[in-house]
Amino acid sequence: MEPITRRAALGAALAVPAAVAFASTARAVSPTEIDLFFPVPVQGNLANKMRELIDRFNAEHPDVKATAVYTGSYDETNLKTRAAIKAGRPPAAVIMSANFVREYVINEEADPFDPLIEHSGKTPDDFFDEFWPALKSNAVIGRRVYGVPFQNSTPLLYYNVTAFTEAGLDPDHPPATWADWIAAAQALTKSSGGQTQRWGLMFPATYDYCGWIVSGLAMSNGGQYFNHDYGGEVFYNAPSTLGALGMLDAMVNRLKVTPPGVSDANACTSAFFAGHSGMIVLSTGSLSFVRENMKTPYRVAFMPRNVRNAAPIGGASLILPKGNSPERQAAAWTLISWLTSPEVAGEWSRFTGYFAPRKAAYDLPEMKEYLQQHPDAKVALDQLQYAAPWFDTYNTVAVRKAMEDQVQAILSAKTTPADAVQAAQKNADELLRPYVEETALKRLA
Amino acid sequence: MRAEWRLLGLLAASAAALIWAVPFAWMAVAALRPGVPADIASLTPAGPFGLRNFNDAWQSGNFPLWYFNTFVVCGGILAVQLVTITAAGYALARITFPGRDILFALFLLQLLLVPTLLIVPNLETLVSLHLYDTLLWIMAPYFASAFGTFLMRQTFRTIPRDYEEAAMLEGATVPALIRHVLVPLARPGLAAFAIVSVTAHWNEFLWPLMAVSSPSRQVLTVGLASFASGAEAGSAWGVVAAGTFLVAGPLLLLFLIFQRRFVASFLFSGIK
C-alpha cells in the first residue's frame, strides 16, 4: 500500500491529476518499474529531451514503467551508481561513460548482456556487429558484451572560415598533418601591442577532456597510449606520447599560438564564437551547440595526423549494474533495445551531434537527409574509420589523471615533456600495481 | 593618524567588496543578454538586453517543484537541528556527567570528517531504515550538527547562571528553563546557526544528487545542474546565469530583508 500512496502523492506534485496517477498504477497488471541513470555530458536541453524519450517509451510499452534519473556529469554518475550498488539499490540501467565499463567488469559490478541478447535470438557477436567496430573494445570485455553504445563522439577540428581566409589559408584544405596544423595556427595567431587578439588553436585541457585529446594525439603519432586489451598497462613514456606532448609544448610555450594554462570547453567555445580562436579541438558531441551558436561560417575537419590518422572514441554506453532481479533486467533490456534502435539512436544523434553507434541508423531516410543538410556531421561520421578505443584501465580516473596533471603542468610551463612522461609513467605504474600483481604478475606456483 | 588608518581600512574593505561583487555583477549582466554573445565576458556590454534567458531557464525544468523540495529540505533540517543542538548544547554546557569533555571532543572531531567519505555508509544505513529515495533521506544525516552543538554550548556558557538559578527557585523544570529562559537569551546564536545551516543545505549538490533518484524529489541545485552543466561542450552562459539567479534568488531576498539582524547575530556570535 505504502508505495502506491506515495506514488499518488508524487503524481499530484507533478501537477498530474492524482486520480489519473492512482488509476493507472492500480491497473490489474502492474508494470515492471525500472530506473535509468543518465548523465548530461553536453550542453543543451538534453535532460528534457531524455525525459521526453522515456515518456514515449512508457507510452509504447505498457508493461514497463521507466523513470529517467538525472545523475550529473559522467564522473558523478559513476559515483552515484557505485554508491547505489554498494547500498543494495542498483539502478536497472545506466548510461555510463564508456571508459568506465571495464572497471565495472574488473570490480564485478556489472552483468553481461549475453543471456538477454541470446534470448532475443541473436548471438552476441552478431549483435555487436551491428555497431561501429571501433566501439567494441570499450564494450565487449573478455568476449562478453557489457556495454551497449548509446551516444558516441570523437574529437574534431573546428575552424573559422573567415579567419582562415583572412590569414591567407584555404578553408577548402584544412590542415591535415601536424606540420600544416602548426603552420596554420601560426598564420591565424594575430597580436597587437603584445596582446594576442586571436589565438591559432585552443583545446580544452580540463580533467577527462585533457586525457582524451592527448591520447588522440599519441595515437595520431603512431602510438597506442594504453593497452587496449589489458587494463594494467599504459604507454605514457613511449616515444609516440612524448612526441605528442612535445607538439603541445611547442604550440603553447615556444610558438605561443595557444593560450597558456588550462582552458575548459566553455572558454574554447566562447573564444571560437567570438573569433578569438581560429581553430578549436572539441567533441563531435558539441556539433549541435556550435551549429546553433556560431554566427560566422565555420567548418570541421579530421584531427590532423603525424604518423597516421586516429581519433579516440568518447561517449557513453548502457550498462546493467549487478544486483537486479531478472524481471527488472528484462525490462531494462526492453528499454535499452529501444533506446539504441536505429530510429531512436538516430533521433538522439540529430538532437545532440553525437554520432549514432548503430550503423543501421544511417540507412534511415531522415538520417541521410540530415547528413546532406549538415556536412559537418558527415565529417564526424567519416572520421569513424580512424577511430580508436577510449582510455580504459583499472582505476581509470586516477591513472588518467596521472598523465593529465603532467600535461596541465606543461601547459603552464612548469615542466618539460621529457620529465612529464617519466613522472606520469611512474605514477600510473604505481596506481596500476595492485591489478597487475593480481593478473599479469601473479605468482602461479 | 587614527583617521588615516580608518580611511585605509575603509578603502581596503571597499576593494575587497568590489572584488567579491564582480561575479554577481557579471552574472546579472549575462543573465540579461539573450543568446551566446561574442563579448560574453564584458561587464558593460552594449546590448541587446532581455528576459529571454529567465524564460528559457524556467522552461528547462520544474522550478516550482524544486523550490518546494528545497524549502522542505532546508526547513526540515533546520527545525530538527534547532531542537537537537539546543538540547545537546545545554547538556554539554550545564550538566556535569562523566566523560563530558571527551564527548565534546568527539563532537568536535566529527567536524574534521569530509562528508563525501560518508556517502556510502550513509546510503547503507538509510536503505536499511527503508528511507530510500525520500526527502527525509536527504535530511536525516544532518539532524544532528556538531557545529551547531558547539555553537550553542559556547552561547549557553556566556549566559550568567543567575537567570537559571532564579528560574529554578520559582520551580521551573529543565525543559521549561531551556524553553523560557535560555532559548530567548540565545536567540542571536540560533539565528547565526540558522543562516549557516540554511545556506549550506540550500547550496548543497553532491548529497542530494546521491540520495534521491525520483525526478519529483529533486532539489534546486541538482535541477540547475541538469541543464547548466556540460563537460563536452560549451555553455549557454546567459541561461546558466539566469538559472543561477533563480536558484540563489530566495536566499538573496532573505538576506536583504533580514540584513540588519543577520549582521547583528554574526557580531554577537563571533562567526565570520
Image: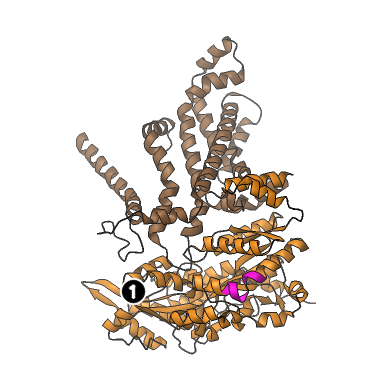
Chain colours: A orange, B brown
Q: In this view, which residue lies farthest toward the top?
A: B170
Asked if residue A17 can be seen in this view, the reply is: yes
Horizontal arrangement in the rendering, residue B190 relative to residue A129 (left or right): left
Classify mark 1: helix, strand or loop.
Answer: strand
| Stretch of the chain drawn in magenta | A337-345
* Placement of A62 over or under B144, stated as above or below: below
* Placement of A269 over or under A375, stated as above or below: above
Q: Chain of mark 1?
A: A
Viewer-side residue, A396 vs B242: B242
Q: Based on the picture, tell me whether residue A340 belongs to the magenta stretch.
A: yes
Tell me which residue sits at (65%, 53%) in the image.
Answer: B120
Asked if residue A414 can be seen in this view, the reply is: no
Q: Amino acid at mark 1?
A: Ser
Viewer-side residue, B213 vs A443: B213
Horizontal arrangement in the rendering, residue A359 relative to residue A208 (left or right): right
Q: Quadrant of the C terminus of chain A?
A: bottom right
Number of labels in the image equals: 1
Q: Which residue is mark 1?
A: A277
State the image quarter where residue A136 is shown. bottom right
Q: Based on the picture, tell me whether residue A66 belongs to the magenta stretch.
A: no
Label 1 packing within 10 angstroms: few (<14), some (14-19), many (20+): many
Q: Quadrant of the N terminus of chain A?
A: top right
- Percent across and percent down for residue A238 are 53, 83
Magenta stretch, overall SS: helix
- Percent across and percent down for residue B145 are 57, 38
- Percent across and percent down for residue B99 are 65, 31
- Percent across and percent down for residue B255 are 40, 38
Q: In this view, which residue lies farthest toward the right?
A: A445
Viewer-side residue, A346 vs B185: A346
Viewer-side residue, B77 vs A45: A45
